[in-house]
Each structure stands twice: as C-alpha cells, then as structure tokens.
Image (cartoon, helix red, strand yellow):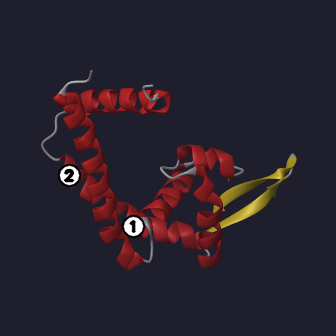
Amino acid sequence: MPSETNFDLIIAVLATADGFLREGSRLFKPLGLTSAQYNVLNILAESSAPGGLSQRELSDELVVDRSNVTGLLDRMAKAGWVRRDDDPADRRIYRVHLTPEGRRLWEKVAPRYAAVVAQVTRGLTEEQVSATLAVLARLKAAAPKWKLAD
C-alpha cells in the first residue's frame, strides 16, 4: 500500500500542472493563443525537420490527447499560423509547417514564456532540476501501467 507521502506527491504534481495550465492561459490568452496552441508553435519553430512534422510526430510531442490534435490544427490553420501539406511519399499523412505569420507570433510569445519559466525556476539548482526531471520521467513511464485492483 502506498504511503501517504506518495499520495501527497501525486496530488502535488497534479496541482502544480493545474496551476501551470491556469497561469499559461493568463499568459497566452491576451495574444489569442491557448497553451496547446503555443506548444504546437514552439515544437514546429524548434523542429529541425525540413519537411515539417507529421501530425502523428507532432501529437507525440504535445501535451494534449491525440484525439484533439486534428481540431487543434484545424483552428490554427484557420488562424493562419500553420499549414498542412500532403506527404509526397504517403498520401495518408499530412506534414505540418509553421507559416510566416505563425513564426512571427511564436517570436513574440517565446521570450515572454522564457521569462516566466526563468521566474518560476529561479533559485533551483541544476541538481534539483535534474532530480525533479528524473522523478517526473519515472512517474510518466509508470502512469500507463496503472492497474485497478480486483
């Protein structure tokens, strides 16, 4: 049976994630963005894939449910931030690219996001950050293995 401290850990992780999502909304909303849309812009802007990313590759990187990716990209394409092109090697696949307008928006938002990340992590040592990342990676890997007790 897990200890009370283990339960406290999971509650703290969820509460922290919820707080970051809430504050991310406050940061991005005045710019007409959601946190998920910023994540797409950021992934595409930092991608080194010359042909863009497939929707599947993008969904693997995103912090959203795969079922939401198509609608998310539809809204972003309508706003002019991304475009989808057919994959020349596979007609079932779309390649997603950042448009010039999407890149301009990302260039406007990215420094603001970097500033709040620096603010939130100020005072943490590299060792603390590394240890936290290691713990979070273990929790992430264990989550899909949840089993309900009979």
In this rendering, the label closer to the viewer, 1 or 2: 2
- Quadrant of the image containing the C terminus: top left
Q: CA distance from mark 1 to mark 2?
A: 17 Å
Q: Which mark is residue 42?
A: none
The residue sitting at 53% across, 66% down in the picture is: 103
State which quadrant residue 127 falls in: top left
Instruction: Please provide percent x and percent y for residue 21.
Output: 34, 59
In the picture, measured across the screen, residue 109 lies left or right of residue 92, that is: left
Could you tell me which secondary element the residue under label 2 belongs to?
A: helix
Sequence-wise first label, 1 or 2: 1
Q: Compared to 121, does 96 lie above or below?
A: below
Farthest residue toward the left? 123
10 Å crowding of disc 1: few (<14), some (14-19), many (20+): some
Farthest residue toward the front? 150
In the picture, measured across the screen, residue 4 lies left or right of residue 54, that is: left
Instruction: Please provide percent x and percent y for residue 7.
Output: 23, 34
Q: Compared to 1, does 103 lie above or below?
A: below
In the picture, measured across the screen, residue 39 lies left or right of residue 56, that is: left
Does residue 49 appear anywhere in the picture? Answer: no
- Quadrant of the image containing the N terminus: top left
Q: How many discs appear? A: 2
**Residue type (three-letter) at the residue carrying disc 2:** Val
**Residue type (three-letter) at the residue carrying disc 1:** Val
Q: Which mark is residue 109?
A: 1
> Mark 1 touching mark 2, by CB under 8 A?
no
Could you tell me which secondary element the residue under label 1 belongs to?
A: helix
State which quadrant residue 99 falls in: bottom right
Instruction: Please provide percent x and percent y for residue 31.
Output: 40, 76
Instruction: Please provide percent x and percent y for residue 149.
Output: 42, 26
List the residue tagged with mark 2. Answer: 120
